[in-house]
Amino acid sequence: MTNEDIFSRIDHTLLKMTASREEIKTLCDEAVIFKTASVCVPPCYVKQISNDYCNQDCYNQDCCDNLNICTVIGFPLGYSITAAKVLEAQRAILSGANEIDMVINVCDVKNANFDYIMEEIKLVKKACDDKILKVIIETCYLTDEEKIRLCIIVTEAGADFIKTSTGFGTAGAVLSDIELFKKNIGKNVKIKAAGGVKTREDIVSFINAGADRIGTSSGVKILTGENAGSY
């Protein structure tokens, strides 16, 4: 697997609380240079990126030929109310995002409120219209039985991806979860592994196990040996 193949599957990510405007610009420049699948950034930067990298001053137009913008909703804890997540998603799409990574409410999982989780995902997906929705289930807090149930819910709710982790939990992606997802998701659902991806071997293992996307802030360093921002 070539570096070009791997970069095409990476969501080049910067979601830390202190992310500066300059750091976000560096992230986007790298994404253009290495042709990553997307940049995954805080919602507060979506409009700025869309303005800076689109061919014209536009919103919700597919004119960003070289940069695909992803952002996060209900991040990182997931327990904001559904109406807030729906509004966040709508505003992000209007600002120029093409992909939305939403966090489910793990409290609902622990309380077996699975119908509520299903409805929430459906509503956020509706808000995304034809844009991609990835559902973060935060695997580190779940049993295998809960993960399987969520694979079914994500499939039936019409989401495009199931995603392992926020990167803010007690652990990130592990290979066994990718294998579990692969066995239990529907044919139209893809997999994103995120959190704790630190080596090229990690990335290749996740892809070979069935992950279609890899979320990492370290992709450039992993694949080129250079520190981010040196280009």
Image (spheres, rainbow, N blue to C red):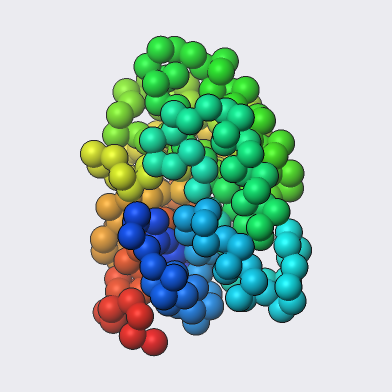
Pick the front one: 8 or 33: 33
**Residue 207 place in picture, x, y as percent:** 42, 55
Q: How many marks?
A: 0
- Can you say whether 12 is above or below 107 in the image? below
Examine the rendering and report whether any part of residue 10 can be seen.
no
- For the residue pair 130 and 3, the one nearer the viewer reads as 130
Name the spot of residue 190 as percent of width and height, x first: 55, 45
Does 222 appear above or below 165? below
Q: Is residue 27 left or right of residue 218?
A: right
Please provide percent x and percent y for residue 118: 58, 23
Q: Quadrant of residue 3?
A: bottom left
| Residue positioned 67% across, 44% down in the render | 90
The answer to whether residue 149 of the structure is visible from this angle is yes
The residue lying at 61 percent from left, 29 percent from top is: 83
Give left or right: position of 160 versus 231.
right
**What residue appears at the point 53 percent right and 33 percent down from the top-left corner?**
185
Horizontal and vertical percent position of residue 153:
55, 25
The quadrant the C terminus occupies is: bottom left
Residue closer to the observer: 86 or 120: 86
User: Does 115 appear above or below 5?
Assistant: above
Residue located farthest toward the bottom when viewing the structure as drawn? 231
- Locate the N terminus by quadrant: bottom left
Q: Residue at x 36, y 74 (%)?
A: 220
